[in-house]
Amino acid sequence: MVYGAPTKHFSMTLTDMQGVIEFAQTLAVANQEPLHVLTSPRTPADAVEWLRAKAAEPASPIAQFSTGSQMFQQALATGNRFVVTGDSASMVAETCRTGAPVWLYELPPKKTFFTILQTLVDTLGLRHLRYAMVKMGVLGSGADFARWHSWLVHAGYVHAVTPGLEKEDLHWQPVSGRIDRSLKLCRDRILALPQLAEITGQQPPAQVSADRRPVVQI
């Protein structure tokens, strides 16, 4: 289980803390696997202590983030499945790239003037105007995490933690054999750099046409 922290986009209550670790424990038991709990750099100290006490009941080790530690990289390399809180786009993306089952635990979104304004603009069909203002630097990114999370679930990259899951749901597997086109595009562009081609002596890969490039707006 990879546990984040409250952010400007999400709150995290005691109910959320209890819900995510109880689900992770249920998932571990269903798959007959040990549970390991990892915290993020942003996880508050009081939350770490609460998690440590809660995880001690079924003897689940908890690894607290520390500078220079490779625990997250080790977990990505060895984990059979992941439960991730939805506050961090990087945590969700990194666990998805492993190909292992990823369970997304949604957190309550914070309501601010800007999030309400963003919702209103999108509802009125003016999302293109918001994107233009973001590019101009007038507005912040205004990332729509809920929309991105829904896309990940719909595409089969993650499974949402929802009430009333059946026992067989706990053995869910993601869609396999999928090409990560965004990662491939990034790789191709790096290999196409003239300086790199001169060093390696290899021809750069064919460029992906614009109409085939993945576009995911959040």
Image: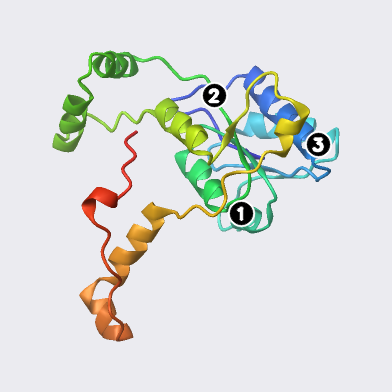
Q: Is residue 179 above or below residue 123?
A: below
Does residue 158 appear anywhere in the picture?
yes
The reply to whether callout 2 and callout 3 are in contact (CB within 8 Å) is no
Question: Looking at the image, is mark 2 or mark 3 earlier in the sequence?
Answer: 3
Q: Is residue 131 left or right of residue 47?
A: left
Q: Amino acid at mark 3?
A: Ala
Residue 200 pos. (x, y %): 33, 84
Question: Looking at the image, is mark 1 or mark 2 earlier in the sequence?
Answer: 1
Q: Which residue is mark 3?
A: 30
Q: Nearer the viewer, residue 69 or 207?
A: 207
Task: Say few, some or many: other residues with alpha carbon within 10 Å of mark 1 (under 14 / 14 to 19 / 20 or more).
Answer: some
Give the Cα separation between the discs numbered 2 and 3: 24 Å
Q: Residue at x 59, y 44 (%)?
A: 174
Circle 1: element type: helix
Q: Which residue is mark 1?
A: 76
Q: Amino acid at mark 2?
A: Leu
Give the Cα separation between the discs numbered 1 and 3: 21 Å
Q: Is residue 87 above or below residue 111?
A: below
Q: Amino acid at mark 1?
A: Leu
Q: Quadrant of the C terminus?
A: top left
Q: Residue at x 70, y 50 (%)?
A: 80
Q: Quadrant of the N terminus?
A: top right
Q: Is residue 11 left or right of residue 189?
A: right
Give the Cα separation between the discs numbered 1 and 2: 22 Å
Q: Nearer the viewer, residue 210 or 114?
A: 210
- In the rendering, which numbered label is found on residue 107? 2
Q: Is residue 42 left or right of residue 145?
A: right
The reply to whether callout 1 and callout 3 are in contact (CB within 8 Å) is no
